[in-house]
Structures are given as structure tokens and as C-alpha cells.
Amino acid sequence: MPELLKTESRSVVVRVQVRGGPVPTVILKHARDEPVCGLDELAGADFLTRRGLELGPRLLAADVDARFFVLEDLGRGRSLEELLNGENARAATGGLIDTVRLTGQLHTSTLGRQSEYELVRQALPPRHERVRVENARFLLEHEGRLLRWLAAVDAEAAPGLHEDLEDVARTLADPGPFLAFTHGDLAPSNVLFTPAGPRLLDFEYAGMRHALYDALMWLVTVPFPDELVARADISYRITLSSRCEAAQVDSAWTRARATVALARTVNLFQWLHPRVLEEDREWAPGISQRAALLHHLARCRALLVPAEGFPALGRTLASLESRLRERWSVPPFVWPAFRSLE
């Protein structure tokens, strides 16, 4: 009998048995309501499979018109999210560092491979523009949503804010030496530990963009102990530096981290409405929207300290953080695996 693994508006995922084939089971995935996400995932799986990169499930077959494809079944291992929700801090720490190194391998293996990826993606029904250009465009087109937050809490928009946002957007659109194939939605639930090692799942937001977009998981978006963030950052930089000379240069590295952190932090205020000031809701399992906003601001502030540039955007976010902390007293989120370390 087929085993339903996931069903949502975006996609349906099923594990099925194979009779008389070279493998006992495969994963069937149908992209439903968001076809671009499905086709981006198909292109990503095809691209990695053609390059022989065993970083995620291999693509076995596809029906493009039906947005239906067959993937390698990686088995029933534990996810990074399960390790973080467990009681073993050592296992959770090791899981994150393994994930960081795997992410670095994904990027080092695809640096400078833009034309190869585009050949695969362009063979599918067209998307209206490259994902990194979409990211940059969204940041600028919705500047008003950030200003709405500033007005709601009487925070200061520093002179030069728009110019700094344009600077960040330019780098998102053209990452230069940091351009690589990225997962695009790197979350603990999308990392599976198999007998062959960690693998990445669900490439629905994959594409060629700034490599450190994926590094946002440990740098900004997911709360981890500060010491573990520093260790993850070093591990990723070492891996990426083996193929990316820019990652070896301190000034380029600190600016790259600050750029993606600023973009994601502003994005969060663009995604969430100021009604959060009146009512807090869940952002991710165990993390409220208010906690997420404060965490992003704090991490962004820390990453801006060693970086050059973005003074207006830095002052603006500092003013916003100060106003929000006056209003909110939100305990920081701690994964169960790390609570014994406090």
C-alpha cells in the first residue's frame, strides 16, 4: 500500500513499493497549487543528479506536464529537527555541523555552474525571472512594509535607508564569486540523516543565488547557542573556502554574511504585519512571531558589527529593535537538546 508522507496545498508526497525493480521503494511527488515551486524542485533534482552529486534524492523519472516526478527513497532516518527536539546535545550538535558541511559541499560543487543549471531549468516551463532577481526585487518593492513597522513603533528611519537597501538588493541579484546552487529553504526538517550520511530534502525553493542564503539557517533564522553558531560559521567557511577565494578574505566574508542577514531580517518585517504588536502568533513550531523578530534583529546586529557598510540600515534596525524590546519581554527559544546546557 502507498504510504502518504506529506499532503499540503503545494504538494503531495507518497512512498510506494516497486515490484521487480532495482530498488524496493521510491518517492512519488506531485506539485499541485504552486507549479513554479514544483518545477524548481524538479530542475534542482535533475541538475544534482546529472552532476552525480549525492546531496539529496536522485531524480529517477518525471512527467513535466503533470508536474509529477519520481525520486530516490532515502529511507526513514531521523531529521535534524528530531535531533534538536531530543535530549542528546552532542547528537544535535554533530547533526548541525554535518548539515553545515553538507551545505558547503553543495555550494562548492556548484560554484560557477550557472549556465549548466539554466540549461536544465530553461528546458522546463519558464519562470518569469531568476530566483535571485525575485529576491532582490521583493526587498525593494516592499520597502513600504518596513516603513510601516517603523511608523507603528515610532522608530527612526535613518537617512540613506533606501540606498542601503539598494546596495543589499544589488548583491542579492548579482552575488559575484558567491553565486552557487542553493537549497533555498534550508530548515532542520529538510535534513535527513541516512546510513550514507546527511541528505537535503524538498528543493522547492532551489536556484542559483548567493551561497550564504542557505547559511542563514544557522546564522539568523534558527536559534542556536552562540558558541554553536560560531562553530558552524567556521566549519562552513572552511568548506566553502576550498573553492571560493572570496570566502578566504575577511572583509568579503563579513560583508557577505551581513548582506544576507540584512536581507532576511528586512524580509521578515515585510512578511509579517504590524498586527503582531497587538497579538503574537506562532511563527514556527515552538517559536512565536515576536520571538522570531527579536532573534533576527539580534543576530543581524551581531553580524553587522565586523562588517563595513550599511550604516543607515543598521541604525534603522537598531532603532526598531530598541522600540520592540521596550514593548516585548519574550524569552529566547531554546531547543530541547540544548536546555541542559543552560
Image (cartoon, grey):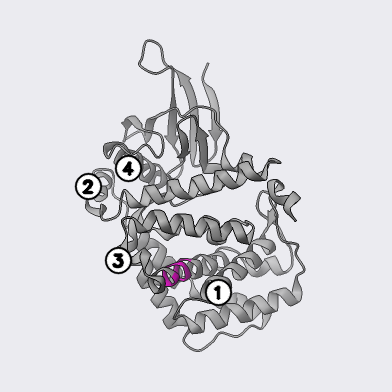
- Which of disc 2 and disc 1 is earlier in sequence? 2
Residue at 71% of width from left, 61% of height from top?
332
Kind of residue at disc 4: Ala
- Which of disc 3 and disc 2 is earlier in sequence? 2
Residue at 59% of width from left, 76% of height from top?
148
- Which of disc 4 and disc 3 is earlier in sequence? 4
- Which of disc 1 and disc 4 is earlier in sequence? 4
- Look at mark 1 in the image and give the residue it sits on: 146
Kind of residue at disc 2: Leu
- In percent of width and height, residue 79 lies at 57, 38
Task: Check disc 3: other Cα within 10 Å, few if <14, some if 14-19, many if 20+.
Answer: few
Task: Check contact, mark 4 vs mark 2: CB within 8 A.
Answer: no
Of 162 and 10, nearer the camera is 162
Q: CA distance from mark 2 to mark 3?
A: 20 Å
Q: CA distance from mark 4 to mark 2?
A: 9 Å
- Which of disc 2 and disc 4 is earlier in sequence? 4
Specify whether 39 is left or right of 218: left
SS assignment at label 4? helix
- Look at mark 2 in the image and give the residue it sits on: 119
Kind of residue at disc 3: Gly
Q: Say the numbered circle drawn on residue 176.
A: 3
Specify whether 107 is left or right of 162: left
- Look at mark 4 in the image and give the residue it sits on: 43
Q: Is residue 214 visible?
A: no
Residue at 75% of width from left, 62% of height from top?
331
Query: Which circle, 2 or 3, is nearer the viewer?
Result: 3
- Outermost residue to the top: 20
Q: How many marks?
A: 4
